[in-house]
Image (cartoon, rainbow, N blue to C red):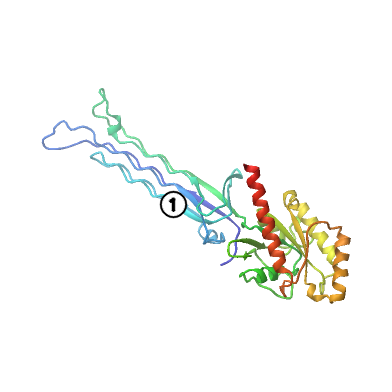
């Protein structure tokens, strides 16, 4: 299924059923009174996050969603049936905005999260409700209220613990393939990744985390160049960024240092929050270097970047150094959770 991370939909709640004005007409009760019943409430529209949906593609072809209206009241004080509520399944990580005001009205992060987006209309009243000591034969009744209707913008932001940054062909997809069961497309040319890929990394029987790969970021991404900008938002929920650098690019005109600096510059222009996230430098494809030159080559990259944060040298293709990297990530995430729990307490 095609990956789609934005969609616009129209939701319409059901109208409330109108009340009715009727009177009892029975053979041995000549003075029968009012017996008009109330209408039923209109059905409401809800969004609910589910785990077996990972794209908003379906909404491109089905943009109108209407809940059932309530039935009108009936005689003998019978109330009309309530309209059924409509529950719309969306992926976890879906943000919901009111299109007209651009107001954020909800964020469905966890499986089972439910958001009311259009409330059903209130039912009308039958003439029985208007009976009183001075009005024994009321003719009046009320109509049901219309249900809410609104246009919504849905925006999907994938939920992952770790996000991968890097130029096209830096080896991000290769890393996900080597450490998880995910199988994104890999080829020896750039821009093979066209949409985010998620992989679950299991470091042992009890511990795991989710890693996300997005299309490569190129120079000018913050102004809209390439696909990277469109998907950078998917890294905003991550707790850690891995900045992957190809230590020995085949045909690139940029050196590894120039490539790394361009990525840093683009994310700083795009979002201060993303730029402030913890970021580790991962020098990939060290299998392309001779053993006697690898250490000096990697050191020169680090020195020129003036990098002082965590550093890993790996070969995603050969799975060299990837196990140590995954364990370090898991320890970092566990420590971050403990610190957050302590702060909340």
Asked whether 172 or 126 is in front, the reply is 172
Asked whether 340 or 269 is in front, the reply is 340
Question: Which residue is found at the position 86% from the left and 59% from the top?
Answer: 305
Q: In this view, does 318 lie to the left or right of 207?
A: right
Question: Which residue is found at the position 46% from the left and 53% from the top?
Answer: 87
Residue 77 screen position, x and y as percent? 25, 38
User: Please, which residue is most extreme toward the left here?
Assistant: 28
Q: Is residue 308 left or right of residue 271?
A: right
Q: Which quadrant is home to the N terminus?
A: bottom right
Q: Can residue 51 be seen in this view?
A: yes
Q: Is residue 342 left or right of residue 89?
A: right
Q: Mark 1 points at which residue?
A: 86
Badge 1 marks a residue whose secondary structure is strand
Q: Which quadrant is home to the C terminus?
A: top right
Quadrant position of residue 163: bottom right
Q: In this view, does 238 lie above or below 70?
A: below
Residue 287 screen position, x and y as percent? 78, 75
Quadrant position of residue 5: bottom right
Q: Can residue 215 be seen in this view?
A: no
Asked whether 115 or 291 is in front, the reply is 291
Image mark count: 1
Asked whether 4 or 184 is in front, the reply is 184
Residue density around tag 1, few if under 14, some if 14–19, many if 20 or more, within 10 Å:
many
Q: Is residue 146 left or right of residue 56?
A: left
Residue 61 screen position, x and y as percent? 52, 61
Question: Which residue is found at the position 81% from the left and 60% from the top?
Answer: 262
Residue 174 screen position, x and y as percent? 70, 71
């Amino acid at each position: 299924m095609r990956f789609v991370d934005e969609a616009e939909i129209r939701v319409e709640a059901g109208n409330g059923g109108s009340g009715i004005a009727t009177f009892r007409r029975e053979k041995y009760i000549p003075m029968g009174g009012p017996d008009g019943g109330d209408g039923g409430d209109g059905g409401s529209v809800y969004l609910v996050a589910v785990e077996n949906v990972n794209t908003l593609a379906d909404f491109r072809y089905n943009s109108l969603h209407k809940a059932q209206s309530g039935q009108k009241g009936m005689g003998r004080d019978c109330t009309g049936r309530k309209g059924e509520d409509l529950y719309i399944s969306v992926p976890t990580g879906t943000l919901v905005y009111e299109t007209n005001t651009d107001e954020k009205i909800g964020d469905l992060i966890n499986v089972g999260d439910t958001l009311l987006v259009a409330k059903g209309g209130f039912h009308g009243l039958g003439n029985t409700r208007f009976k009183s000591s001075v009005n024994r034969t009321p003719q009046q009744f009320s109509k049901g209220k219309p249900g809410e209707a609104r246009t919504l913008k849905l925006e999907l932001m994938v939920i992952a613990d770790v996000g991968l940054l890097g130029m096209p062909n830096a080896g991000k997809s290769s890393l996900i393939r080597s450490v998880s069961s995910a199988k994104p497309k890999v080829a020896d040319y750039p821009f093979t990744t066209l949409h985010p890929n998620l992989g679950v990394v299991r470091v042992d029987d009890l511990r795991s985390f989710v890693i996300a790969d997005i299309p490569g970021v190129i120079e000018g991404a913050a102004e809209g160049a390439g696909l990277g900008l469109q998907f950078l938002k998917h890294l905003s929920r991550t707790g850690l960024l891995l900045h992957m650098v190809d230590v020995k690019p085949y045909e690139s005109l940029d050196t590894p240092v120039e490539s790394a600096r361009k990525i840093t510059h683009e994310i700083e222009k795009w979002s201060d929050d993303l730029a402030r996230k913890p970021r580790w430098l991962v020098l990939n494809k060290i299998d392309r270097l001779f053993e006697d030159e690898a250490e000096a080559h990697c050191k020169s990259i680090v020195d020129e970047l003036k990098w002082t944060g965590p550093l890993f040298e790996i070969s995603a293709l050969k799975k060299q150094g990837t196990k140590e990297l995954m364990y370090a990530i898991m320890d970092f995430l566990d420590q971050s959770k403990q610190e957050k729990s302590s702060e909340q307490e």
